[in-house]
C-alpha cells in the first residue's frame, strides 16, 4: 500500500473539484464551453490546484506552530518569573491574535528622510524569506510541501538572506541607531553562519545526503546524530540562537542601548511582521535541530510522526526560552570572540570527528 | 602572582557563573511554581486590587462643611491645580469651595497638609481615568469624599505657649505665621474683617479721631488663637499694610 501523503490526499480533492466543475459546465448545456470542463480534469490544472492546496494547508499549519511558539515563550517565561503570562482567551492562546490586531490598527509611519522603497521592501523580503523557510522543513514523510534533493542547502541559503535585509532596513531608516544595529546584526549573522555550515557539513558527511528525508531515515536506522556529534549539536544550538537573534545574542535589537536596533523606525504592522519573522526563524532553527540531530519524526509508533516532530520542536524551543530566561545579553566583543574563537574551532573538531567516524566505517 | 584588573574587558565569561548557575536557578523556580497549588504573584488588576497602604496618597478629597474657604490649598499647590469656585449648597448656602484639576494634580498631598481645618484630605482613590479632560476637573461636589481616620495629613502644631527653651524665643519654623499690621498705612476700610474666614479680625476704635471727617479711626485687631494663617487679609488689603510674620 502506498502511504497517503498530503499531496496524494489533496490530489483527490483537486480532482473532485475538477469533476464538479466539469459537471456544472455540462449542466449548463452550452456546447461551446464544454472543453473548459474537460480541461479541468486533466493533469495540469489538477496538479496546480493540488500544489496550491498543499501550500495553503502547510503554511497555515506552520504559521500556527510559529504563533504557538510565541505563546509558549510567553507562558514559560511567565512560569519562570512566577507570574501568569498571557491571559486572553483559553490559556492565553488568543493573546497573539489580539496583539496582531492591535499592531494592525497602529499608524504606519515612514521617516521623512528614509529611503521609502527600500524601507518598505526590506520587511517584505525578511518576512518572505522567513515564510519560505517554513515550507522547506517537512514534518514527516507524508506532510510536506516539496521534497527537492538539496533541501538543506536551499534552506541554509534562504536562511542567510537575513543579514542582507537587515542591512537594507537599517540603512534605509536613515537613523544612526538603526545603522549600528544593522551592522551589529550583519556582523553577528555572518560570524555565526560559518560554524553552522561546518556542522551541517559534518552531517552531510555522516548521512551522505542533503535531503531531510534521507537524513531522518539514516537516524532511524542508526542513531540520533545528537549522540555521535554532540559537540556539533551544542555548536549548532548556540549558533541557531544567535542566528534567530534571541537572547543572549540579541545584539541587533539591544533595546537598552540601541532603542530597538535596526527596527527602531519600524512601526505598526511592519514591526509586527519583523517580530513574527524573528519567531518564525526561531521555529525554523528548532525544526532544523530536530530534523538534523534529534531524529526528526522518529519515535514510537503509538503517536503520529508529525506529533513526534512537533513535540521535539517545542522541546527544543523550550530550551531556547530557558536559556533566554537565564542569561544576560553579551557584549559585541564577547559575541565575536565566542563566534570565531570558540564555536568555529568546535565545529571544525566536530567535522573531524564525523570524518573519522565515516572513515572507520562505524556508520 | 595573578594581577587582577577592574577592566570589564579582562573579565572572562566562565561557564559556571554565567550559564550553569542561572540555568539551574531558573529551572528550579519553574518547577517549583508549576507545581499545583502555587499561585503566581500576578495581581489580576481589574478584578482584584492590591492592598493600599494606610499612608497612600490618591486624589485629594474635600469635606465641604469643614472647609472655611481660606484658600491656603490654592496657594500651596505646586502645580496650581486648585481653584476656588462658588457653589450652591443645601445647608451651607452660597459658598466658595476648592475645585481640583485632578489631571494636573501630582498627588503630593500638600493641600491636605496645609489645610487648617482638615477639610482637604487625601483619599485612597487612584483609578482616575476618564474619557475627556473636562471630566478630570473635579468640582467641589464631585471632589467630596467621606472622611476616615488617616485621610488627613497632620503635622504636630506647636503653640508658642507650649514651647520651652531658646526655641521659644527665636521663633522656630514650627511656629505658625501671624499677621502684622503697619498701622500708618491703614485706611480703615475693614476689608480684612469681612474676608477673614475664621472671624479672627475685629475692627476696634483706637480712640483717635480723624481730623477731616471727625469720625473715630478704627484699626484691625487680630485674634491669634482664631487665625489660621491663610493670608486672605494680606491679599485683600488695598494698601499693602499687612504682612505675615513668624509669631514671636
Ligand atoms: S485650605 Fe482647607 S479650609 Fe482653606 S480653602 Fe482649602 S480646603 Fe478650605
Ligand atoms: S495634592 Fe498637591 S498637586 Fe494635588 S491639589 Fe493638592 S497641593 Fe495641588
Ligand atoms: S484690609 Fe488692610 S487697609 Fe483694610 S482694614 Fe484691613 S489692614 Fe486696614
Image (spheres, grey):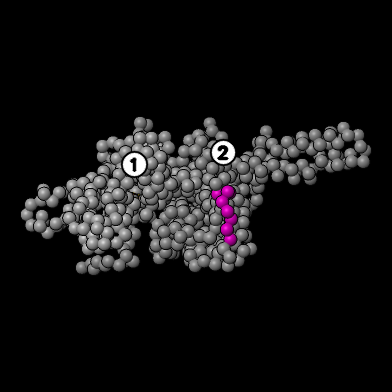
Q: Which residue is mark 2?
A: A306
The secondary structure type at the circle numbered 1 is strand
**Residue A87 visible in the current orientation:** yes
Q: Observer-nearest residue: B144 or A220? A: B144
Q: Residue at x 57, y 58 (%)?
A: A109
Q: Residue at x 79, y 38 (%)?
A: A18
Question: What label does residue B192 carry, if any?
Answer: none
Task: Give neighbour class at mark 1: few <14, some 14-19, many 20+ (Cα, 10 Å).
Answer: many
Q: Residue at x 75, y 45 (%)?
A: A48
User: Which secondary structure class fits the magenta region best?
Assistant: loop
Beta carbon at label 1 within 8 Å of ligand 1: yes
In the image, are marks 2 and 1 on the same chain?
no
**Residue A133 visible in the current orientation:** no
**In this rendering, position of residue B215 left or right of residue A310:** left
Q: Residue at x 32, y 62 (%)?
A: B12
Q: Position of residue B137 (x, y in %)?
A: 43, 46
Question: What label does residue B62 carry, if any?
Answer: 1
Q: Is residue A212 magenta?
A: no
Q: Position of residue B183 (x, y in %)?
A: 21, 60
Q: Position of residue A102 (x, y in %)?
A: 55, 46
The secondary structure type at the circle numbered 2 is helix
Pointer 2 indicates a residue of which chain? A
**In this rendering, position of residue A329 left or right of residue B4:** right
Q: Observer-nearest residue: A48 or A211? A: A48
Q: How far apart in space, not on screen, are marks 2 and 1 (Cα)?
A: 67 Å
Q: Position of residue B49 (x, y in %)?
A: 37, 37
**In this rendering, position of residue A196 left or right of residue B117:** right
**In this rendering, position of residue A109 left or right of residue A27:** left
> Magenta stretch?
A103-110
Amino acid at each position: 500500500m502506498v502511504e497517503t501523503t498530503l499531496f496524494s490526499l489533496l490530489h483527490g480533492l483537486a480532482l473532485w473539484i475538477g469533476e464538479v466543475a466539469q459537471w456544472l459546465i455540462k449542466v449548463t448545456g452550452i456546447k461551446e464551453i464544454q472543453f473548459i470542463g474537460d480541461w479541468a480534469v486533466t493533469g495540469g490544472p489538477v496538479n496546480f490546484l493540488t500544489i496550491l492546496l498543499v501550500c495553503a494547508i502547510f503554511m497555515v499549519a506552520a504559521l500556527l506552530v510559529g504563533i504557538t511558539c510565541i505563546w509558549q515563550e510567553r507562558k514559560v517565561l511567565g512560569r519562570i518569573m512566577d507570574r501568569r503570562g498571557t491571559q486572553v482567551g483559553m490559556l492565553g492562546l488568543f493573546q497573539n491574535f489580539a496583539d496582531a490586531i492591535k499592531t494592525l490598527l497602529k499608524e504606519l509611519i515612514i521617516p521623512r528622510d528614509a529611503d521609502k522603497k527600500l524601507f518598505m521592501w526590506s520587511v517584505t523580503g525578511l518576512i518572505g524569506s522567513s515564510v519560505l523557510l517554513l515550507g522547506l522543513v517537512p514534518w514527516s514523510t507524508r506532510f510536506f510541501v516539496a521534497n527537492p534533493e538539496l533541501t538543506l542547502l536551499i534552506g541554509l541559503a534562504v536562511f542567510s538572506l537575513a543579514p542582507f535585509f537587515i542591512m537594507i532596513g537599517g540603512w534605509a531608516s536613515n537613523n544612526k541607531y538603526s545603522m549600528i544595529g544593522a551592522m551589529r546584526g550583519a556582523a553577528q549573522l555572518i560570524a555565526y553562519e560559518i560554524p553552522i555550515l561546518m556542522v551541517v557539513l559534518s552531517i552531510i558527511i555522516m548521512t551522505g545526503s542533503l535531503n531531510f528525508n534521507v537524513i531522518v531515515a539514516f537516524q532511524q536506522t542508526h542513531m540520533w546524530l545528537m549522540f555521535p556529534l554532540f559537540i556539533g549539536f551544542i555548536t549548532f544550538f548556540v549558533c541557531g540562537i544567535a542566528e534567530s537573534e534571541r537572547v543572549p545574542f540579541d545584539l541587533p535589537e539591544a533595546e537598552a542601548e540601541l532603542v530597538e536596533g535596526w527596527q527602531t523606525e519600524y512601526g505598526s504592522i511592519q514591526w509586527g511582521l519583523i517580530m513574527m519573522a524573528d519567531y518564525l526563524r526561531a521555529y525554523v532553527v528548532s525544526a532544523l535541530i530536530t530534523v538534523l540531530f534529534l531524529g526528526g519524526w522518529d519515535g514510537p509508533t503509538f503517536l503520529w510522526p508529525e506529533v513526534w516532530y512537533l513535540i521535539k520542536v517545542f522541546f527544543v524551543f523550550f530550551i531556547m526560552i530557558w536559556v533566554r530566561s537565564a542569561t544576560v545579553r553579551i557584549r559585541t566583543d564577547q559575541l565575536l570572540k565566542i563566534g570565531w574563537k570558540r564555536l568555529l574551532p568546535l565545529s571544525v573538531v566536530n567535522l573531524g570527528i564525523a570524518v573519522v567516524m565515516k572513515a572507520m566505517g562505524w556508520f | 602572582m595573578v594581577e587582577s584588573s577592574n577592566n570589564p574587558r579582562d573579565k572572562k565569561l566562565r561557564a559556571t557563573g554565567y550559564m550553569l548557575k542561572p540555568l539551574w536557578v531558573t529551572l528550579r523556580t519553574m518547577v517549583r511554581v508549576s507545581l499545583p497549588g502555587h499561585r503566581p504573584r500576578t495581581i489580576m488588576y481589574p478584578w482584584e486590587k492590591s492592598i493600599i497602604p494606610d499612608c497612600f496618597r490618591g486624589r485629594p478629597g474635600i469635606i465641604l462643611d469643614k472647609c472655611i474657604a481660606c484658600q491656603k490649598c490654592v496657594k500651596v499647590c505646586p502645580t496650581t491645580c486648585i481653584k476656588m469656585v462658588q457653589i450652591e449648597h443645601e445647608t451651607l448656602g452660597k459658598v466658595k469651595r476648592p475645585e481640583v484639576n485632578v489631571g494636573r494634580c501630582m498627588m503630593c498631598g500638600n493641600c491636605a497638609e496645609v489645610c487648617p481645618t482638615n477639610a482637604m484630605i487625601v483619599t485612597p482613590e487612584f483609578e482616575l481615568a476618564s474619557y475627556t479632560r473636562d471630566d478630570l476637573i473635579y468640582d467641589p461636589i464631585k471632589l467630596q469624599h467621606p472622611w476616615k481616620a488617616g485621610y488627613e495629613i497632620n503635622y504636630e502644631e506647636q503653640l508658642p505657649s507650649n514651647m520651652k527653651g531658646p526655641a521659644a524665643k527665636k521663633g522656630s519654623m514650627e511656629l505658625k505665621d501671624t499677621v502684622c499690621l503697619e498701622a500708618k498705612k491703614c485706611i480703615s476700610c475693614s476689608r480684612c474683617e469681612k474676608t477673614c474666614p475664621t472671624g479672627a479680625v475685629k475692627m476696634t476704635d483706637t480712640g483717635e479721631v480723624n481730623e477731616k471727617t471727625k469720625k473715630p479711626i478704627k484699626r484691625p485687631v487680630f485674634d491669634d488663637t482664631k487665625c489660621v494663617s491663610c493670608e486672605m487679609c494680606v491679599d485683600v488689603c488695598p494698601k499693602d499694610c499687612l504682612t505675615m510674620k513668624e509669631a514671636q
